[in-house]
Amino acid sequence: MPLGRSRIITIASLLGILAGVLPILAAFYMAWAVVEARRQTQLADIAGYALARTQATFGDAANALEAARRLTDPTCSPTHIAALRAIVVNTRSVEDIGYFANGMLQCGSWGRPTIPVPRSAIDVTLSSDIGVTASLRPLISGGTPLTGFHSGAYVALTSPGRFTDVPVDKEVKLAVLAGGRTVVGARHDPDLSLLQKLAGGAKPAPSERTLYDIARDRDWTVIAVSPKPDVFRDLGDDLPMFLAVGVATSLLMVGLVVWLSRRRLSLLGELATAIRRREFIVHYQPIIDLQTGACVGAEALVRWRRPNGETVRPDIFIPLAEENGLIEPITHQVIEIVVAELKDLLAADRSAHIAVNLSAQDIQSGRFLPFMATLLEAAGVRPDQLWLEATERGFIDAKLARVTLEKARQSGHAVAIDDFGTGYSSLQYLQDLPLDALKIDKSFVDTIGIDSATSTITPHIIDIAKSLGLSVVAEGVERQEQADYLAQRGVHYAQGWLFSRPLPKAEFVAFYRRQSNGPI
Ligand SMILES: Nc1nc2c(ncn2[C@@H]2O[C@H](COP(=O)(O)O[C@H]3[C@@H](O)[C@H](n4cnc5c(=O)[nH]c(N)nc54)O[C@@H]3COP(=O)(O)O)[C@@H](O)[C@H]2O)c(=O)[nH]1
């Protein structure tokens, strides 16, 4: 099996595994994200409801205390006690109201105490000046904790369950804090130290795997927390739908990878056959002398003409050929075609030249040189009439590149660096390698007349080339304004759609006859 095939198969297998696995993992993740977002919304709802319950409960207690303070009966008289009882009976959230003097309970809605009851300490005072004792265990509750609200001489007692009396799943834990720190009510036994931390603005550690939401007003903070959903336990309802989409996507992507790799394998196979059957043709893009307007030659650009008449662009098959060790025979065929098609023109006009593109492998091996020399000699074409173009990729092994370029120049060929300025080390190569010409990449020519960051680079490239004594060829000239600018800056040659698109041999020869200063 050729190296290229096994590489395509290896890459396709890896891509196939990724295409198969990633959509399914994505399905799990999306199902999990949806459940998490839903749980977050639930927490926000629960915290909001609990805050509303707390505000209502506290509002009741505050009204009851206000009513008690307005009583005018002699304190702890039967009418005073009866009035306190009436307030308690008519206030849903209040279990009792006690009257205190000298720090001791004097009486409450149920009468006078039978044993001395001291007033409890206030844990926190709210903005309305009402004090809160979080957990009282008064006689009337039989030891059940109650929340006390202090206002003046009165204390109203409320069941803490009233603050958190909202529908809550068992995994959701809830707490209500007065003044941001004192816990007055809780559901499902939360970790109070964690909740107090969260109320203070801290974030849970990732290892705690906790979701939470906080609702608050000036006096009250409600925190609802729940564990993050578990991929294997909590995705029950949502997973099948996402998994179905994930499996369908995964099948589609695997199918796409198989289809693309089969296409690539078959394109590679067809390319190998095309080389054997010599299915390549060459078009010629005229190169123009900017000072005289005369055509001085052309760049040879290969095309693959398939047996069904379809033409494949070089930017599709040249990279495939380069990746799979098939480029050298293509370069050889291009040189053969150029010499066969244009030997008469080149022999008739010795000033004409044709530029041939070389790939990295051509430069590294240098095998095209003896092959080309034999062909040129047999055809009576002079080596200086065949220019060689190479991009930076051909210069990566600078030692080998230097050997090939020096041999080429000794034979009489001119060597140009193509697509100048698009790589990382263009300047380095200009300094280190034996070159004759520099081709300014189309991307720089495009900026002429346009105010962009790269438009300032073009004149520098021209100046550098001139100072190194290199010929300058501008590529991709499409507008007259660009040609005028380049001519005025002393650029020697240009090619581009302004002058002509790449042409088949007969059209190029006709173009050359019309527009050259030579003898033909
Ligand atoms: N190793 C080899 N590489 C080759 C060979 N023949 C071509 N190529 C490389 O393929 C790339 C695409 O070439 P192509 O589709 O032929 O495009 C060339 C021109 O047609 C195009 N161009 C020229 N003028 C203009 C213009 O004014 N506007 C515009 N939008 N495009 C224009 O540019 C391509 C020439 O590029 P370059 O070589 O950089 O001068 C391309 O990279 C070829 O190099 C081959 O035989 N061997």
Image (cartoon, rainbow, N blue to C red):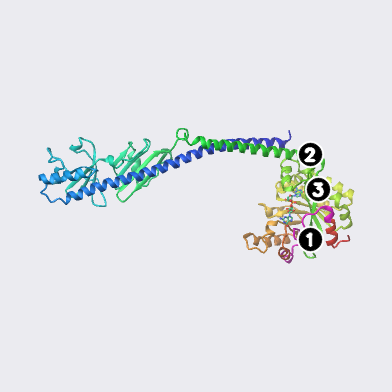
> Which disc number belongs to residue 459?
none
Mark 1 residue type:
Ile
Task: Tell me the residue that label 3 is attached to.
Answer: 281
Measuring 37% from the left and 38% from the top, which residue is drawn there? Answer: 172
> Which disc number belongs to residue 288?
1
- In the rendered image, residue 213 lying in the magenta stretch gets the answer no
Q: Is residue 137 visible?
A: yes
In front: label 2 or label 1: 2
The residue furthest bottom is 488
Mark 2 residue type:
Thr
Mark 3 residue type:
Ile
In percent of width and height, residue 398 lies at 72, 48
Residue count near mark 3 (Cα–Cα under 10 Å), binned few <14, some 14–19, many ≥20 = some
Q: Is residue 470 visible?
A: no
Discs 2, 1 touching: Cβ within 8 Å: no
Q: Nearer the viewer, residue 252 or 337?
A: 252
